[in-house]
Amino acid sequence: MEPDSDKKHVWDKINNWEEELLFLKSIIDKTELVETIKWGGPIYVYNKRNVIGIGGFKNYFAIWFLNGVFLKDEKKRLINAQEDKTKSLRQWRFISKSEVNEKEVLEYIAEAIENEKQGKVIKPSKKETIVSELLQKEMDQSPALAEAFQKFSPYKQYEFLEYVETAKQEKTKLSRIEKVIPMILGNIGLNDKYR
């Protein structure tokens, strides 16, 4: 890959922070993590599992703890950049090299590695409820359908909704609804025939 072709990558604001990021790297080099490049930035792995990443942005440079949710964070350094979206990732931001306390950084990284060793990962959260306006409309028009739908376990209801709502186009959603209505009325789960 030519050196320039990666320039447009979001993480490539790195030039602002070259010296700072090299300093972070020199600290991370003291740990047992192995540097790889993923998503256009350095990611440090333990036993093939991504533990931390570093990168420079316009106004700060940061360490990402990819499973940072498990860190005790007694010093309150970590932030969740996107409260509603990010389940496990946490960032530690710096705006100058003098802010980087090597001892603290190494403590946090050691804890992150320990968590990996213990296999701490976020279990996928209980599935968010999916709402299907189109299917709901059908049920509003057909009490029998609504009643039949209610007989399914939440998991099976979820499978129907997911099947309908993962269609990108409305016409596909509608054809999927046509397909599932007789199943719902017949009390046949979406995947029953495969079970």
Image: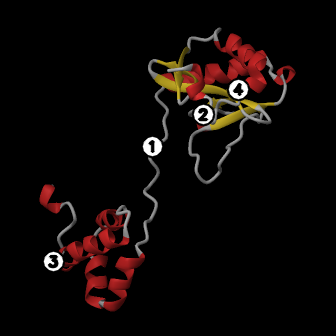
For badge 2, the amino acid type reads His
How much space separates mark 4 and mark 3, taking CA atoms? 59 Å
Q: Dot 4 corresponds to which residue? A: 14
Residue 74 visible in image = no
Horizontal and vertical percent for residue 129?
44, 65
Mark 1 burial class by Cα count in 10 Å: few <14, some 14-19, many 20+: few
Residue 49 visible in image = yes
Q: Dot 2 corresponds to which residue? A: 9
Horizontal and vertical percent for residue 36?
52, 18
Given contact means CB atoms under 8 Å apart, are the residues at marks 2 and 1 in contact? no
Where is 52 relative to 25, above or below?
Answer: below
**Camera-nearest label, 3 or 1:** 3
> In percent of the image, x 34 and y 63: which residue is there?
167
**Camera-nearest label, 3 or 2:** 2
Q: Dot 3 corresponds to which residue? A: 186
Q: Dot 1 corresponds to which residue? A: 123
